[in-house]
Amino acid sequence: MHSMTRHQDMLPRQRRKPKKSRGLAVVVLRQLLGAAFVSATSFAAVVSGMGHLSMAYAATPAAASVSDLRPYAAGPGFALVRNAGKDAPVRIDMVRFDPLSKKILERRPTTLACERVHMARQSIFCLGTSQQGSTGTGLSYAVTDFKLETVFFGKMPMGMAVSRARVSPDATHAGSTVFIAGHAYGTASFATQALVIDLRQRKLSMPPLENWNIFHNNVQISSKDMNLWGVSFDPRNPDIFYVTAAIKERPYLARGSISARRIDLLRPGIECPSVSPDGSKLAFKKRRGRTGWAPAVLDLASDRETVFQESRSIDDQIEWLDNHTLVYELNTPRMMGVKTDLRQIDIRQPQNPARLWLENAASPAILR
């Protein structure tokens, strides 16, 4: 068993007409995924032509199906996020942004529904879906393709809460982390299960990472009482990924080889690694006190760490907007709950504090 800790207001100047869904594709996808896709008439949120600090909601547009998203996915400045508005249903929104300024241009609901989302090339990996007609209990996952519109789904072998999801840059593999005990990384007792999924085989064909050969200083060690979480794939080598491996609650950065089914512990103090698009850096969360974390970056060539300013603790697997901009979710306590927003940091200006990128959003996934 693996342990793992769980873990704008500016009105649009001109209301845009909603795009019409492609009926047959929507019907087919809904039949395949059931409740993993939600009714297009259930939601009302569109944002257009606004800056990164503001968001506006307009009259109900049709939710975008996967086929509706295809034109956006052909160019830069496209993202998917989970809607994190108060009392909001589980839903994935599409976001268009200016690749240079990072300003939000449009936000629109989609028919995708899951707790964590990530994507690469044409593939979308949805972790934590619910499926109508499925038997048994447990967390489900779904994979769909912008180009071919093919969909497959399945159930995770274990899990009670979703934590992390990633797709490799070549879209051949996905990485998942779920809690099998507890539900947060800051809790005293927790357990996780991390998987690498071969998307070409359309099934869970590899054992959980705790069952791989694990080495520290070239000595094989037992995975008993070890936690593994937060898979991130190397864009320069499709066989390599990074992951957190914690021994007796001490987290290490580890590197894995898919072909060798081997994981090597590298250095302590790095949690939830996220490889930059060019493969030269790792973003991660740096422990700050007993239960807090700050955003940080490790330069892989120089082995230099940079820790960035943030007013509150972060508990997220950081995403990269580009090779020098980080984006991550931040929770802010409120009288009636917690507000979750996405924040951004330019790593070239470490003296500057983080700033808001997108309100009421979580699980950012940037298409490259």
Image (cartoon, rainbow, N blue to C red):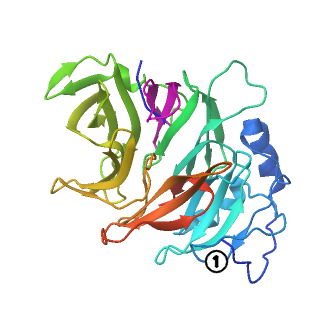
Is residue 234 found left or right of 139 in the rendered image? left
Q: Is residue 54 above or below residue 132?
A: below
Give x and y (percent) for residue 77: 53, 69
Is residue 125 found left or right of 48 in the rendered image? left
Whether residue 363 is visible: no
Residue 296 occupies quadrant:
bottom left
Residue at far front of view: 335
Return the residue nearer the eye: 80 or 249.
249
Residue type at mark 1? Met
Q: Is residue 58 magenta?
A: no
Give x and y (percent) for residue 116: 57, 43
Q: Is residue 11 above or below residue 277?
A: below
Residue at figure coordinates x 45%, y 25% from the top left: 190
Task: Say which residue label 1 marks.
Answer: 50
Residue at far bottom of view: 13
Q: Main secondary structure of the magenta part?
A: strand
Residue 239 occupies quadrant:
top left
- Find numbered disc 1 in the image and state the secondary structure of the residue it sits on: loop
Is residue 317 found left or right of 283 in the rendered image? right
Magenta range is 172-199
Q: Is residue 174 magenta?
A: yes
Q: Is residue 315 above or below residue 133?
A: below
